[in-house]
Amino acid sequence: MSKSILIFVLFTTSCFGQGKTNLFQGGYSNWAVTLPWGGNKVDFISGLPVVGQEFRAIDYNFTGTNITDSVGNLLFATNGVIIMNNVNDTMVNGTGLNPSQYTASFNLGLRIIQPNIILPDLSDPDRYYLFHMTFDQYPPNAQANYFYLSHIDMSLNGGNGAVILKNHVMMSGVFSPNRLTACKHANGRDWWIVFVEIYGSEFYYFLLTPNGPVYSHSQSVGNRNGAAQAVFSPDGTRYGSYVTDDDFEVFDFDRCSGLLSNRRQVAINDSMVGFGAAFSPNSRYLYGSSGSYLYQIDASSNQPDTTLTTVATWDGFYCPNFPFATSFFVQQLAQDGKIYSSTGGSTCAMHSIEFPDSAGIACNVQQHSIILPTYNLGTMPNHPNYDLGPLIGSGCDTLTHINELYATKPLTLSVYPNPIVNDAFEISYSLEQNKVGYLEIMSGSGQVVYRKTLPQWSSYQKLNIPELSNGIYIMRLTSGYKSETFKFVKQKLQ
């Protein structure tokens, strides 16, 4: 790797965290198969979802999340029972997560949606916090009595990591183990961590700073019942959820104070049970999964009920066959700018929303567009927006060096190797915050010979362009109002 590329990778890793949401993992092996278990993965580092199979130490039974490094390589993952390292083995001290009778009955992975989330330790780039919950009572009286923290140090065990603190109780109470999510503070460094009281009105807020996580405050904002997936919009201005009992709920969010306001509720008159939710990349539209139906509302409206649209109805497809129905379930916005939905049971398919920034059916829901090599029991990662910057001018953007960094952040573009001696090569780049990039390759005469859209929040791609003949080329990157060019040589050996 050239010195310039090394400097760029260190810069993006320490300052902007791009690449951390590259990998979706899920699935489990056939039960008749002995260990190691097999599962599926969807890798977005090329800008397109690349589906693969992997053998690893854990299965996923609904619960599952992970974090990757700046170039999309797995750091660690968890299924709510075990923490797995970056070589798909059990991490040192990584067993016995979430101690409870319920957890012990699902030792191949918890069957809970959104009970854990991974955030960086702001004082050490090699360390990460895992915040997590489980059912401490069996359904139907399903509740979490503890909000836990575990601490992971990736510098240990030869770079494979180790758990240095596990199951540390941060708070006791009566909580929903669903709806554990997080959003960057308006200073662009700290994090708000949010979870809710079960069958009640209380929201609980912890603030993560370089000194660690501390309890901040609670807020009583209307009663809510049922299971749900909750999400912050990519720009951090809204918080929304889709709840089995109360359906759509959306708030405005103040990243400075960590307070919700302007609650809007949209009732859905169907009998289906589902609770997936995701915001569009432009933070305007909120999607909700209700089994056989996928809904969209305009979250920017003060009357979102007037914008309710059914954007897809389950088409009756089964995978691999009846009775494995590919209904709509948990959702996640990926770094390619599309939203993906798991299905409500053990199937071998996922759905995609191709243009989630578009209103109504123009969002183009593609049912069972991703076929997986193994069964997946509804698992989707719980990825926050690690790349959200400071809210400049908000009054609490007090970290001057971070604000200046984002405000003056240039586009960068590098090619490796240079000269290119075969058809495959790598590009590293930075984009305007929350903006897609447009890549063009031009010949020496100025003719455009290749175009590609780069997804927002991405910073690294592998390209293979066999049609490039030997010669000198100009690569141009445009994002927002900025552009950057880079000269490279194609010199394929004959």
Image (cartoon, rainbow, N blue to C red):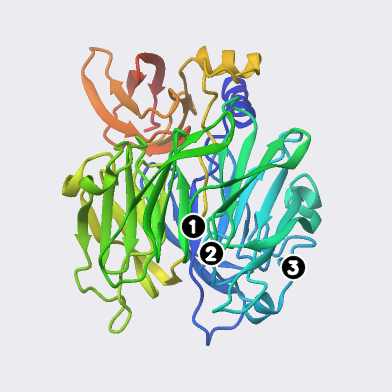
Q: CA distance from mark 1 to mark 2?
A: 7 Å
Q: CA distance from mark 2 to mark 3?
A: 31 Å
Assign a secondary structure to mark 1.
Answer: loop
Residue at numbered disc 2: 199
Residue at numbered disc 1: 223
Which residue sits at x=50%, y=51%? 23
Q: Crowdedness of circle 2 by 10 Å Cα count: few (<14), some, many (20+)?
A: some
Q: Are marks 2 and 3 in contact (CB under 8 Å)?
A: no
The answer to whether 135 appears left or right of 358 in the picture is right
Q: Quadrant of the C terminus?
A: top left
Q: Position of residue 359 (x, y in %)?
A: 21, 42
Q: Position of residue 111 (x, y in %)?
A: 54, 72
The answer to whether 165 appears left or right of 136 in the picture is right
Q: Nearer the viewer, residue 330 or 259?
A: 259
Residue at numbered disc 3: 95
Image depth: mark 2 or mark 3 in front: 2
Image depth: mark 3 or mark 1 in front: 1
Q: Amino acid at mark 2?
A: Tyr
Which is nearer the N-term, disc 3 or disc 1?
Answer: 3
Q: Amino acid at mark 3?
A: Thr
Q: CA distance from mark 3 to mark 1?
A: 36 Å
Which residue sits at x=58%, y=13%? 404
Q: Quadrant of residue 139?
A: bottom right
Residue 318 versus residue 466 in the image, above or below = below
Which is nearer the N-term, disc 2 or disc 3?
Answer: 3
Q: How many marks?
A: 3
Q: Are marks 1 and 2 in contact (CB under 8 Å)?
A: yes
